[in-house]
Amino acid sequence: MPKKPPRGLTINELRLNAAQDAIRRRASGDNVSGDLVRLAWTVTKIAFRIASIPVRLVIRARRRRQNADELHRYLRGDDA
């Protein structure tokens, strides 16, 4: 399993790293089908990460709303 890329890399840097890794593997005798599987897995991980952004934003907004409600109840002296 390839190690995870560090966060903050641009798409071009990820592509460059993948191309360099593929060249190294081919030079060492690794097959091309393995490269395709790794590429598909990388694309899938990136797609899942992008798809999870709205979910994370909703969760963050909900937590903020709950914290604000709790603070208002505390300041009013309401016991929930």
Image: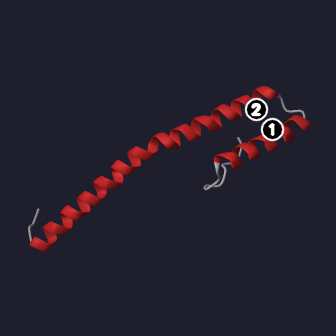
Residue 16 visible, this orientation: yes
Residue 28 visible, this orientation: no
56 relative to 35, above or below? below
Disc nearer the start of the sequence (2/1): 1
Residue farthest along the top direction in this orientation: 33
Q: Which mark is residue 35?
A: 2
Q: Residue at x 24, y 58 (%)?
A: 66
Element type where label 2 sits in the image: helix
Q: Position of residue 79 (x, y in %)?
A: 9, 66
Q: Which mark is residue 22?
A: 1
| Side of 20 relative to 57 (left or right) | right
Q: Position of residue 15 (x, y in %)?
A: 71, 43
Looking at numbered disc 2 in the image, what kind of residue is underneath it? Asp
Q: Which of the 4 image quarters holds residue 75?
A: bottom left
Between the residue at mark 2 and the residue at mark 1, the CA separation in whole angstroms equals: 6 Å
Looking at numbered disc 1 in the image, what kind of residue is underneath it? Ala
